[in-house]
Image (spheres, rainbow, N blue to C red):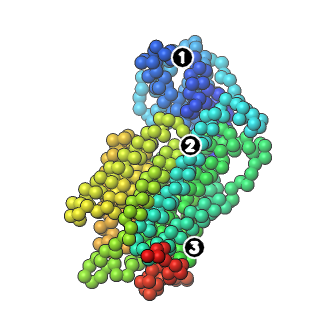
Amino acid sequence: MRESPNLGVAIWEEVPTPFKWMNLTRLEQVRKEFGILTKPGAMRSGGQTWKKFAKISQLARRVLFRKRTSEQELLFESLVNQPKKLMRDTFNLKTLLLAALVAMPLMFGNLVAQEAAAPAEAAPAAEEAPAYATYDDFKAGPEYAGFLANNLWIMIAAALVFLMHLGFATVESGLCQSKNTTNILFKNVFIVCIGALGYMFYGFNAMYPGWEAGVSKDFFAFGSPIANGFDDAGLVANMTSAYGTGPMTYWTDFIFQAMFAATAATIVSGAVAERVKLGSFMIYATVLVTFFYPITGSWKWGYGWLNTMGFHDFAGSTLVHAFGGFAALAAVIVLGPRKGKYTKEGLKPILPHSLPLATIGVFLLFLGWFGFNGGSVLSADPQSVSRVFVTTAMAGFAGGITAMLTSWGVLKKPDLSMTLNGMLAGLVGITAGADDIAPFGAVATGAIAGVIVVFAVIFFDKIKIDDPVGAISVHGVCGIFGTLAPAIFGTKSFGVQLIGTLSVSAFAFIASFVLFFLLKITLGVRVSAEEEHEGLDVAEHGTPAYHI
């Protein structure tokens, strides 16, 4: 996910042009800038060398936005600010690769010892980064083509995340009774509309307040509306590579984040389906998305206290999914189960009305997840995006298989709804570490999440927590596991990951419980028994979804 705007801009302005071109369309220009030419006849050796160099250059680009110690400044000076002189007079490509391999762990804060390269001779300062007086100058400049490709991919990813809301709507309505279909679809339409608008008027600037990366221990900031437009200077600052978030415009940044924002309330919608009052839920969803979600989001993605601790949540196993899952758990506890679900004789299943609709919804969500995780790379870098696509997909597939087999063994019959939730559990599980966990680790992550979700659904039914769609198990429980997965299968600290996910989950649960309880004692949150029996389509909307 993106980080706060305007951070690292001062460093960025000092970076030479070659390293500003480190994106998918400018690698060739950087190669020429450094004089690294791979001849057609040398692809077997030179091509592989160039691929390694490209990977190192990608790491170098990420380092540009990090604070550095004095020792790291010297390394940065020799490896970044004077590249052409080093390449021409002192180092060949292999020496540069070795030096970069030594420098990278230091720049990222690791203390792993490496064999150092010979010290470089002093070199003159590199050329200044290009400055653009107008947006048109930027469009005519060398960075524009790469910036355009990156920005376009992030916009496409935003559209894919928007498509996920159709997936949520169809999954929820398919897994519930037909008499409540209109009500569920109505809530999902409302959530995405109010979520984006609330994020526009308040949430975006509350979630990304401009705290200092690696230093801030803040945990709350007031929000404000987004910008309404820019003058000429503002266009250069917010619509070009000068925008400190990444290779995207301010507008792209906002719309990508806004598509994420409504997801938390959508998770709650499924868990409270078939018995919640529409008006009370609309108030609840508005407050949750506009005011509560940006608070915990700022703790990590806005450079708050969790980010300073080193907490890692690439695309939101905790910040989106566990937040929504534990907000849903609190709401369900206050609301209570559906009538007739838990009887003196035991559990009485309330069957879904359309498994085909639920299956379509899961496949739509799976498709949208490529934008959810793939867009969180925040560039169209081919190596990073393709890897995230692979880890995301394999985790979802593995979750489907293990949930299928587990439910078959436990329930004695192959259960489609459990299998569908297993796919979603695998996707939730990999979301925190899609960039950090290797492909086979992603398979293991998804496989474990698929098993967990089956037992979580059974557990919540045993303690009479009624969740018609399994949202608490998929998003809440598997969101926590998914946040721990980068420590199990990746490179992150287990203790930091545990603190982060429990802190966000606890905040979501408490805030949701208080809000839903206040609504219960003031407006009421549950429809009458008669309305619940009749169905909310007629009771709340006056018309059924189906006329057959």
Q: Which residue is drawn at 41% across and 42% down?
A: 390
243 relative position to 180: left or right: right
- Give coordinates of residue 184: x percent, y percent: 48, 71
| Residues at marks 2 and 1, CA–CA distance in whole angstroms | 29 Å
Which comes before the other along the chain, label 2 or label 1? Answer: 1
- Give coordinates of residue 263: x percent, y percent: 51, 60
- The front one of 392 and 293 is 392
Which comes before the other along the chain, label 3 or label 1? Answer: 1
Q: Residue furthest bottom?
A: 530
Q: Quadrant of the C terminus?
A: bottom left
Q: Is residue 73 visible?
A: no
Q: Closer to us: mark 2 or mark 1?
A: 2
Q: Mark 3 points at which residue?
A: 283
| Residues at marks 2 and 3, CA–CA distance in whole angstroms | 34 Å
Q: Name the residue under label 2.
A: 153
**For residue 90, which quarter of the picture?**
top right
Q: Which residue is drawn at 24% across and 60% down?
A: 408
Q: How many numbered marks appear?
A: 3
Picture layout, residue 312 above or below residue 31 = below
Q: How many other residues sit within 10 Å of disc 1, few (<14), some (14-19) or many (≥20)?
A: some
Q: Is residue 374 visible?
A: yes
Picture layout, residue 41 above or below residue 532 = above
**Numbered mark located on residue 332 in the image:** none
Q: Name the residue under label 1.
A: 37
- Contact (Cβ within 8 Å) of mark 2 with mark 3: no
Q: Which residue is drawn at 28% across and 57% down?
A: 404
- Contact (Cβ within 8 Å) of mark 3 with mark 1: no
Q: What residue type is labelled 3?
A: Ile
Q: Closer to us: mark 2 or mark 3?
A: 2
Picture layout, residue 201 above or below residue 134 = below
